[in-house]
Image (spheres, rainbow, N blue to C red):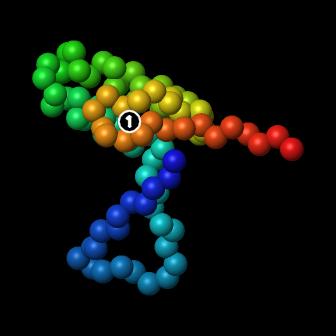
């Protein structure tokens, strides 16, 4: 799952020339879920679940991220694309 990352203006402006567009890391949403968990009640109870999913995501290969739903984010869980057989 790839989504755009907003570009920030620098005090020096944007330099000339072609620039690659920044892309969000594939586990950014899992990291954000961990951050939300830190502020929901007792962190000792709310953080372990999201941190396990974040750790699994970071250790997985691209395309093999965990598909379990997020704990606190209101986003659809990532879906795996099945390989097309012809």
Name above or below for residue 5 compared with residue 74: below
Q: Residue furthest right?
A: 86
Q: Residue at x 23, y 29 (%)?
A: 37
In terms of secondary structure, where does tag 1 sit? helix
For residue 48, side relative to residue 41 (left or right): right
Q: Residue at x 39, y 21 (%)?
A: 52
Between residue 68 and residue 6, name the one nearer to us.
68
Q: How far across and how far down the image is residue 38, in percent?
A: 19, 29
Between residue 82 and residue 56, name the one nearer to us.
82
The residue wearing badge 1 is 30
Q: How far across and how far down the image is residue 41, in percent?
A: 13, 23
Dot 1 alpha-carbon crowd within 10 angstroms: few under 14, some 14 to 19, many 20 or more: many
For residue 36, side relative to residue 22 (left or right): left
Q: How far across and how far down the image is residue 39, in percent?
A: 15, 31
For residue 19, side relative to residue 6 (left or right): right
Q: Residue at x 39, y 80 (%)?
A: 15
Q: Residue furthest bottom?
A: 16
Name above or below for residue 1 compared with residue 62: below
Task: Specify the quadrant of the image occupied by residue 27.
Answer: top left
Task: Specify the quadrant of the image occupied by residue 42.
Answer: top left
Name above or below for residue 35 compared with residue 47: below
Task: Specify the quadrant of the image occupied by residue 36.
Answer: top left
For residue 35, side relative to residue 3 (left or right): left
């Amino acid at each position: 799952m790839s989504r755009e990352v907003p570009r920030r203006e620098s005090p020096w402006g944007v330099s000339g020339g072609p620039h690659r567009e920044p892309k969000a890391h594939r586990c950014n949403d899992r990291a954000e879920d961990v951050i939300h968990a830190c502020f929901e009640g007792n962190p000792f109870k709310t953080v372990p679940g999201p941190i396990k999913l974040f750790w699994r995501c970071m250790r997985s290969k691209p395309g093999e991220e965990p598909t379990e739903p997020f704990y606190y984010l209101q986003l659809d869980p990532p879906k795996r694309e099945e390989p097309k057989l012809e």
